[in-house]
Image: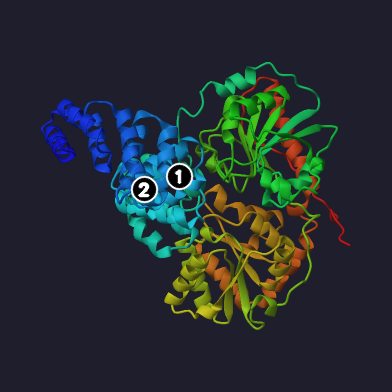
Amino acid sequence: MTPQTLFSNASKSFHKGQYTDALASLNRLLDHSKDAKTYVLLAKTLVALGFREEAARTFVLAAELGGSRAEDHYAEAMKIHFELGNDDLALSLGRPILERARRDPDLAFIIASLFFKRGEKDMIRVFLPALSTSPNSRHNSLALLLLTGTPENPRDRETVANLLERMPRSMVIIMAHLVFQREVNNFAEMERLQPQIDRMLSMNAGQMMRAEAPFYNLHWLANEPLNKLASYNPNAFPACNPAERLAMPHRWDKKLRIGYLSSDFWHDHATMKLVGTVLTQHDKSKVDVTLFCYTDEQYLKAEIDQDRSHWGRIVSVRNMDDAAAAKLIRDSEIDILVDMKGHTRGGRPGILNQKAAPVQIAWLGFPGTTVNVDLDYIVGDRYVLPDQSKPHYWEKFCRLPESYQPNNPVDRPRRKLFTRADASLPDDAFVFGSFNATRKISVANIDLWIRILKATPKSVLWLMCKSDEARDNIRNRITAAGIDGKRVVFTKVVSYEEHMARLTLADVGLDTFPVNGHTTTSEQLWAGLPVLTMKGTHFASRVSESLLRAVDLPELIADSENDYVRRAIDLYENRDKLSVLAERLEANRLLKPLFDSERFCRHLEQAYALMADRARQGQAPDHIDVPALEARAEPFLVEG
């Protein structure tokens, strides 16, 4: 019998479902001919008979013979090994067809899944377009898992936009998409989706909030009752944790052992520019400081010549899981553990869900309640945490008497390095400046700035902007309102010293909402630039009010959107009034509490003492208001 007849018989038997007969014909055929089509038919027959591993090996034999369909045969072998759980074999077969996998969602899913299981996400994000445009929901779900978590990533932005086309009613995808669109100030897309968001809020606000990330929720929803529910999980930690922490055996000493937990313990991070001096000014006779650090090694390598020891004893928990880190903190007999990250990027609040210390508090990092985390207190002040907000926080309030934000008056340079010409600013214009991240510029925010520009014809808007796409979207919004695009001047991110020096080139800083400037606002005030803000309705939108009151400039706090516009116009039209405010800011800078880090430190230590006193007595946390020290009559610092 000829090879052609044997193959024909095998093929007929296979298609009739007579797989044993087909196998017999193929085995005889292989004594005469070993071509690709014979191996392929044999592999299919072995699959039908349940010999899948043998089938996979046979598909590889077919592929190794080459030909136009070799990639198809490798792909079939890889799929079988993947389904059988032979990950290493499947991955080895995927390497020759990586390029094809970028176009084939089934192959992309297999290869990406295998690398994902190994924790190697970075190299497989090339498959995001195939996975995010696939009609298969499993592929779409994997695409979500492969996102970097950084809204400025354009590939992630494209992926989420693709997923939205596939799942236009998915709350999770809609909210993720809007995060990326805010990052590039796509105001048109924000407005397009707003009616859908409003409908979702009215129909089932609780369900919608559970699909939201707390940090990004604050950027568009200044509603504390709803902010409290963002990502809420009632099972995030056992309800008995707080009481058990308080009742655990603990050695209390006269000196308090304070632990600070963060990934920001490096000199150039904005947080350390605020808090660094406070850490060095702790009273060593009353407070022992340990920094539990999980700072990324790349930042520490960049600061190899910087000494961090003056901040306190530094203990690394970077390579520990949450349970191990919590045990280390317990073994260190920490009295009060201060989480300085919360739900900001890179935070590890889960450490606090492992009963790490008798008293656990949130301070400075996250401007709102920290949902799903076992915390006793949040540290704030009466402006960011007014009485009416108490029901909307998981934590009890510990309010400092002036501002919750510390500030370093020593290492903030004040030098005149630039002229307006250096910054491409007109000498004869009134300059409104904003140096906040542009994602904080909401639709309502940009429209108020447009109203201000229309009413102040000899003014310009000076904005710091990282992204070309964001710059174009902002300019387009403003020019569409009939304003000359030349009246918007963009500036880039520069070194800290250069940034502080350029701030005084503006006449007035315009704050953003619903998320204010935080470090950015205090930097402008330190430089001598008055900042106009507006009263807010959640922590993140009340920060600048807190800072302005701590430097005694309440005239720069607007009561409403219309009042914000009115005050901006008034400062433009009445330069004498602006000069008086600038002079008062300069006089208050070294006298009022905002930049008085030593005074702030004493208030913070008193807060710690009051929290610890309750815990020593076995009392559950309750709201605390720290009394103020006597006001200073003389400047706290004399500049040389």
Q: Residue 102 versus residue 603: which sits nearer the camera?
A: 102
| Mark 1 neighbour density, 10 Å: few (under 14) some (14–19) many (20 or more) | many
Residue 583 picture quarter: bottom right
Is there any visible trace of residue 406 in the rendered image?
no
- Going from N to C along the chain, the mark reached first, 2 or 1, is 2
Mark 1 is on which residue type? Answer: Leu
Q: Residue 81 versus residue 616: which sits nearer the camera?
A: 81
Give the residue pinned by disc 2: 131
Give the residue pinned by disc 1: 146
Q: Position of residue 369 (x, y in %)?
A: 54, 40
Q: Is 625 placed above or below 355 here?
A: below
**The furthest residue to the bottom:** 428
Q: Is 226 placed above or below 580 here?
A: above
SS at circle 1: loop
Q: Position of residue 492 (x, y in %)?
A: 62, 67
Q: Quadrant of the C terminus?
A: bottom right
Residue 136 picture quarter: top left
